[in-house]
Amino acid sequence: IQWESQVRSSAQIRRSGGMSVLVTGAAGFVGTHVSLALKKRGDGVVGLDNFNNYYDPSLKKARKALLQNQGVLVVEGDINDSRLLAKLFDVVHFTHVMHLAAQAGVRYAMENPNSYVHSNIAGLVTLLETCKSADPQPAVVWASSSSVYGLNEKVPFSELDVTDQPASLYAATKKAGEEITHTYNHIYGLSITGLRFFTVYGPWGRPDMAYFSFTRNILQGKPITIYRGKEQVDLARDFTYIDDIVKGCVGSLDTSGKSTGSGGKKKGPAPYRIFNLGNTSPVTVPTLVNILEGHLQVKAKRKLVDMPGNGDVPFTHANISLARQELGYKPTTDLQTGLKKFVKWYLSYYGYHQSKPLN
Ligand code: NAD
Ligand code: UGA
């Protein structure tokens, strides 16, 4: 009973026309920011996260505490737990599901392939089964990935491009997710929006990602490894700041329309959409390091190595016309500004004393 009332109170809508959203992966990087933004404007939010130890679980606990302070409950559990999902949908008629829980990371797929199948395929199906049977059905917005473009050489990457060359198992599971969600849209009338995020960074970020681990190593005087592509070409990424991604997520929820099915019966066409959420301005990895050195006022010990062939792609570059048109998506933070905010957060979170103002 107490659990139910906590869930209900977290899901309570405090603005007219608001929504009640189940956010999976809420103790993750993107999930925390999206949950906070929704709660702030008066939507009801319930989080779900299994707090796995892919990276430091204490960071996930700290994000959970931040959310709890703002009245967002994060339930501890796995998206593969169909009984838990059914219980949550019994207590709350979620209007939307923001599905961000996944095994992320490109290179880790070579170490632990089954964790990708568990969360990104089996977990996704379990969640969609719950959504299709819920009455009313929630609209689903979920995180795909820029990695589905794989070895695509046509730049900038457009949603109309063929994506049949995944370069990692991670990318393959995200691509599979796009196909799987399509079938739930087609058969059961679930409203589906897939978002292809491009290398997201910012405060409360992921310690496994390059900008984060580079910062840690630079401050600790340890070397950093910079991968280089064929013929010594620098790798480049369309790094996208978290606040821009959050706006794209919220815009997607706001425009996702209604599912048309109910209780598993199809009633009419519901939207199936895919959008790139990137920054449209790729930056090379050595330039990323230069910017970090500037903000940290410490020189990095660089080790240049050939790209080890572990799933990385040479570059990413988003065409965002479609998201601009349909979602009003308009990224506003460049890498220099965004990394300054990240470094400020990093120094404060890990208790560094800032003797000089940031560059
Ligand atoms: P994250 O790892 O910080 O967040 C994912 C959260 O999901 C974690 O807190 C984890 O504990 C949880 N989780 C994982 N498997 C789960 C399961 N089976 N059941 C319940 N919870 C589970 O990653 P993020 O950077 O916040 O990414 C969010 C989503 O966006 C992911 O789907 C990721 O693949 C996708 N994405 C991220 C980026 C990026 O650059 N950050 C880029 C493209 C796509
Ligand atoms: C990131 C996320 O980790 C994925 O979860 C996400 O799906 C993907 O973005 C995406 O956009 O779809 P990635 O771009 O590989 O993947 O992000 P990082 O791990 O931060 O790597 C950024 C760049 O730094 C890559 O070019 C990588 O090769 C390079 N790198 C990484 C190094 O040069 N050295 C390292 O030690 C680590």
Image (tube, rainbow, N blue to C red):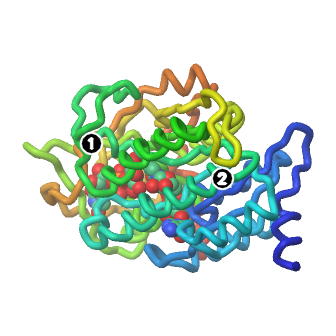
Picture quadrant of residue 234: top left
Picture quadrant of residue 35: bottom right
Q: Nearer the viewer, mark 1 or mark 2?
A: 2
- Read off the residue under disc 1: 150
Q: How many residues crowd around disc 2 within 10 Å: few (fewer than 14), some, or many (20 or more)?
A: some
Label 1 and label 2: CA atoms lie apart by: 34 Å
Image quadrant occupied by the N terminus = bottom right
Instruction: Find residue 348 and report its horizontal and vertical position in percent.
Output: 62, 69
Q: Is residue 157 left or right of residue 190?
A: left
Residue depicted at 31% across the width and 74% down the height: 222
As drawn, 253 above or below 351: above
Q: Which of the two discs, 1 and 2, labels the residue nearer the N terminus?
A: 2
Question: Mark 1 touching mark 2, by CB under 8 A?
Answer: no
Question: Tag count in the figure?
Answer: 2
Residue depicted at 50% across the width and 76% down the height: 52
Asked if residue 293 shows in the view, the reply is no
Q: Residue 221: which numbered mark, if any?
A: none
Q: In the image, what residue type sits under mark 1?
A: Gly
As drawn, 75 above or below 104: below
Which residue occupies the foreground of this view, 293 or 136?
136
- Read off the residue under disc 2: 133
